[in-house]
Image (cartoon, coloured by chain):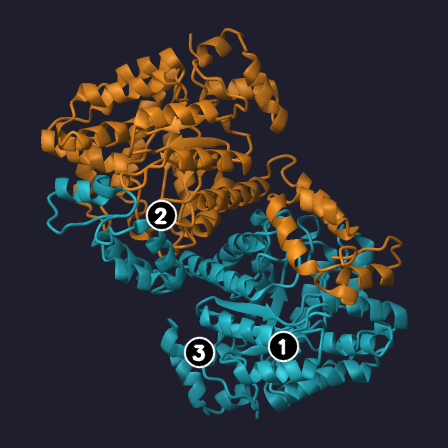
Chain colours: A cyan, B orange
Amino acid sequence: MSLIDDLKSGIVPDWIESIVRDEPITNRELIDGIVSGNIVAPRNILRQMSSPRAVGRGLRTKVNANIGTSEDISLVEEEIEKLRVACASGADAIMDLSTGGDIPAIRKRLIAECPVPFGTVPIYQAAAEAHKRGAAITELTPDEIIGAVEAHAKDGVDFVTVHTGITRRSIDALKRQPRVMDVVSRGGALLVGWIIANQQENPLFERYDELIEICREYEVTLSLGDGMRPGCLNDAGDAAQIEELKILGELRERALSAGVQVMIEGPGHVPLNEIEDQIRMEKELCNGAPFYVLGPLVTDIGAGRDHIVAAIGGAVASMAGADFLCYVTPREHLGLPTVEDVREGVETLKIAAHAGDIGKGLPGAADRDLEMSKARKSLDWSKQISLALDPTTAKRMHAERSGDRVDACSMCGDLCAMKVASEALGIENPVSC
Amino acid sequence: MSLIDDLKSGIVPDWIESIVRDEPITNRELIDGIVSGNIVAPRNILRQMSSPRAVGRGLRTKVNANIGTSEDISLVEEEIEKLRVACASGADAIMDLSTGGDIPAIRKRLIAECPVPFGTVPIYQAAAEAHKRGAAITELTPDEIIGAVEAHAKDGVDFVTVHTGITRRSIDALKRQPRVMDVVSRGGALLVGWIIANQQENPLFERYDELIEICREYEVTLSLGDGMRPGCLNDAGDAAQIEELKILGELRERALSAGVQVMIEGPGHVPLNEIEDQIRMEKELCNGAPFYVLGPLVTDIGAGRDHIVAAIGGAVASMAGADFLCYVTPREHLGLPTVEDVREGVETLKIAAHAGDIGKGLPGAADRDLEMSKARKSLDWSKQISLALDPTTAKRMHAERSGDRVDACSMCGDLCAMKVASEALGIENPVSC
């Protein structure tokens, strides 16, 4: 019995009920959303998870943080620190994208530490291990590719990205309409290489029923990867991307019918004016499946501040209906993120998610903003600090420049706009900006 | 003869022609835009300015950096350094909001250093000087308020913010519909106080013809301030704000008819989903006048990262038609910005302006993005660095984590997505992400 089966039968696990405490929907709406496939609540049956989360219709927009080693930089303790910092900053999910070091050992340590849903991209491990033993990635067997997913499911992974939409059909679309950046998804690129070299269909597509079975058994949520996502503004919304999205919509129906939870991954690099269309297209082609976007990045030239580029795109995507934002760190396109990059990425995308929730009219989304405005008006600095999305940074920045005037406005001094206006308007309480 | 008069007579100064070199419009379109009031090119007749700029229809979205002393922190050298850093980072205009120290001396030093249009808010100086001599702000005479504008014009200031829309009419609107934050514009608040205490109309409104005369004489562009701008999401788009905007639209016509350039200032704090409406409303009520927005800030709880909050709002505003973005620094709401805050603010809002230009379909806006994508594909790191909006930061971040592998992808190593896919697709050049 999968979670969807249980909920259909009226069996509701306790952890499901804990989710709505921090959401603007009822328990009934959450259950209906999971059953209809408009919401996912990723949680492997083997997992201990102190802070379960759900993603989708009517819920707060969530933020994921990618961490993980590379071939060049593989320091387990640094990745554990990234996980802790990301969660302390408010990440709603963690994905381990490790490709260096002892990948299974790293994963197990990270899962044990992770209070929120934990995801992976199993083909990375398969590819990295092939590479380590001197084999070409194209020499991986279909069993090894499927086996990697099963191994991750058995380790307790809550959601897996599988690039099932990279097929002969989507590769044909890619060939018909050449791109500037070809394929920038790592998993997608590996499978394009595998399919062309082996002249065989993608095992994740061809043996999709086996994937569904694995996911049913361990209650793993499928995150159908967008291997054809655009890697630059120029390639956004092209034939390959749309063709893949159609395939993902079809595959999502099959998994959902089998009682397996599914979300859909999306771009990537998209011009600001095309984001809304991209979200609408996904919701139509995938029948309202939760949409998990990477950014989107609204310019290609923001290297060094791509977290901000992603926040612009992510806020607009969230407002348009995206459910889950994968963070981007300041080091995107430049190198593997540091612990500080991870913190900055999470804090930044949290702003985007929050602004999007206000923009999409989520009930209560702006309540904390109203409290902050009242705290500003009454010059209550400790309340202003505590209501900030990142109180630590707000406190530090205020202390650095306010000097001793903690009881007065640090910017305008005696010219404080609110004080002047409120006095003039005959409002009694002393106020300040 | 004002600039508009000259252009109408077919007299085109050389500096006007230099502006279009970096813009996607023709010289003729620029001239027509200035004459019709859809574009402003602020430049005081007394000014030396190495990099003149124009703001408005068909032009790149511009970014302004506010600098200036406060009563608590008044270090001239720090403000000069802020000006240099802002301009080096690509600010298109500088506003000096000094309220501490020897304000006229500070202004003169800053103007002498400033290569781009330079703006001020003259009433700040009038208020600060009244305060210094122990007088209440409400004791300022109308002559002193108008005189401050004239003094700034004589110092070579290119554009001045005047809160002409704070009138008995807009104050009535404010009283009819109470706000959470009342008036957060400093200039606006001072004038609200003055009007109520003196039971007289705003001198900047009542003696507007004199303002027009001063601006004509020195070719000062009027930036009609939004003293009633919302200070929190809750107050956005209320009666006071709309009433003021209507007044500004009327005043703009009067100045334009007299050959004086005008832009309109806008909010402020605005929910993401209301930004487009705000821009459309300004363009309608002010007949296409260039719109100069502060942010907008799309959440009230981003203290410590309000530059990012402003970048989200600014990008969407720019896409919707805003012409000029006032930057916000990370220290907004917390204290007077440092030099580093200024740099971060300019670099961040530049991203917003650029993303907005792509989003609004400005011709050629994404050309550099395309070049970057090609440089990424061909693994040309030096070109990638030089094409970044902030090459210094991109270079540093890349060097910190790339180690010795400058010839290879620093993130994916041998699993580089582009390399794998391009090889599989039979593309010859070695490529990488």
Residue B236 in view: yes
* Residue drawn at (22%, 23%) of the image: B145
Q: Quadrant of residue B392?
A: top right
Category of crowding for the residue at label 1, using alpha-carbon neighbours closer than 10 angstroms: few (below 14), some (14–19), many (at least 20): many
Residue type at mark 1: give it. Answer: Val
Instruction: Check chain identity for marks 1 and 3: say if they share one.
Output: yes
Q: Is residue B226 above or below residue A427?
A: above
Identify the residue position indicated by label 3 in the image: A30
Q: Which is closer to the viewer, label 2 or label 3?
A: 2
Q: CA distance from mark 1 to mark 3?
A: 36 Å
Identify the residue position indicated by label 1 in the image: A76
Q: Quadrant of residue B267?
A: top left
Q: Position of residue A50 (x, y in %)?
A: 45, 84
Residue type at mark 2: give it. Answer: His
Q: Which is closer to the viewer, label 1 or label 2?
A: 1
Identify the residue position indicated by label 2 in the image: B269
Category of crowding for the residue at label 2, using alpha-carbon neighbours closer than 10 angstroms: few (below 14), some (14–19), many (at least 20): many
Tag 2, which secondary structure? loop
Q: Quadrant of residue B163?
A: top left
Q: Is residue B40 above or below residue B394?
A: above
Q: Which is closer to the viewer, label 1 or label 3?
A: 1
Q: Nearer the viewer, residue A9 or B331?
A: B331
Chain letter of disc 3?
A
Tag 3, which secondary structure? helix
Q: Is residue B358 above or below residue A283?
A: above
Q: Is residue A423 left or right of residue B429?
A: left
Q: Position of residue A152 (x, y in %)?
A: 66, 84
